[in-house]
Structures are given as structure tokens and as C-alpha cells.
Image (spheres, helix red, strand yellow):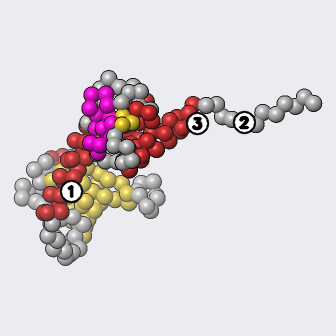
Amino acid sequence: MADGDCFNIGMILTCTTCRGQKINGEVVAFDYDARLLILKSPSSSGKPSLNDIQLVNLKCVTDITEDKKAPEKEIPPLSNLNLNKLTTRLRQATDDKLRQVNYKGIGVTPQAQKLFLVITKTINEVKWDGQDIVILDTVTIKPPYEVGNCSGKEGDNTLTHVRKIVDKFYRDQESRESPASTSSTNSSS
């Protein structure tokens, strides 16, 4: 094997190792610097939907024969990247991650943390201010985080909506904690 050998994807090769083992298959990948060849062959299990993949260290190969050339494939041109769209998506993803980092309350109860996460499912602008939950900078929920602890401008739709979320959160918590209600009928007559 010459030092300048390159292998095209799709070539069918048979490699003979320094131990005399023959490995054949279709070239899937080739790393020139690592002298590593990846071959795909039909599955040894006999299942037609599977393939065997073998990594061949070319430093341990004494002979390579080309059984079939790679088919000529026309490579389609790459489409242009919309950098504005990518930049916007990156900024949104970064903002979301930063917001999620701030989702963890410090010194709050697990139930308060759960309530906070429930609110974030419907409202994006939620943050901790110490132990207070602040929603859209207009509504605050103070410990112990019940409906009566929600404050903001009365009559405001956000305050009304947050109170409904908090109320539903506690009703759901109660229904999960209460034992399954089964109809208990007294069989004595």
C-alpha cells in the first residue's frame, strides 16, 4: 500500500491483515491521518436490515484489492445559509438557557419550585426575586405561595391568570396526595 492511497466512499475493498485475515466491504469512511478505514458489509446475523461495520487499522494491513470502484455520484451544491436566521435562533436558544439557569430558587421549598416551573409552562417571563416569584414584572407571589399571596394591580388580567394557575396547582397537588377515592359501601344491612 502506497503512502498516498485514498479511498472513496462506496468502493468495495478486500483488505488482508498482517495475520492473514481477509476483511471485505464497502468503504463508509476513511481517515487519512489516522490511517483508519471503516467498511460496511452484510450482517453476519443474516438480517437484511442490518450491517456489520468494521474498523480497519491500515498500519496492520499488508494488501488491499479493489473489488469494485465507487459509483460516480453527483454531489448537489450546498444551499446558502441564512445567517440572520441562524443568529436569531442562537440568540433565542441562549436567552432560553440563561432563563432556565435562573429557574432554580435559592432557599425555597420544593413545592414552591414546582409551582414556579408550572407557571413557566404558560408564561415565559418568570423569575425569582429572593424567595418571591415575579411574573412579567407585574405580579408577585410571596411565601407560602398560595392564591392569597399573589399581589399585583387588581383587575389586571395577568394577576387573574396567575391566581388561576396557583389555584389549579394546589388543587392538582391535593388530588395527587389524597388516597384514591373508592366507593365504600357498607355491606352490612
At a point 34% along the width and 40% down the height, the residue shown is 152
**Amino acid type for the residue under numbered disc 2:** Thr
Residue range highlighted in magenta: 127-140
| Image quarter hosting the N terminus | bottom left
Q: Which residue is mark 2?
A: 182
Residue 61 highlighted magenta (yes or no): no
Q: Earlier in the sequence, mark 1 or mark 2?
A: 1
Magenta part mainly helix, strand or loop?
Answer: strand
Residue 77 versus residue 173 in the image, above or below: below
- Between the residue at mark 1 and the residue at mark 2, the CA separation in whole angstroms equals 50 Å
User: Horizontal and vertical percent for residue 125?
Assistant: 28, 45
Residue shown at 37% from the left, 57% from the top: 51
What numbered label is drawn on residue 175? 3
Q: Is residue 45 visible?
A: yes
- Identify the element where label 3 is drawn: helix
Depicted 185 relative to depicted 40: above or below = above
Alpha carbon separation for disc pair 2 and 3: 13 Å
* Quarter the C terminus occupies: top right
Q: From the top left corner, tell me how far across and down residue 176 is, in percent.
A: 56, 35
Where is residue 16 drawn, in percent x and y? 23, 53
How far across and down, in percent of the image, does residue 112 sit? Answer: 40, 31
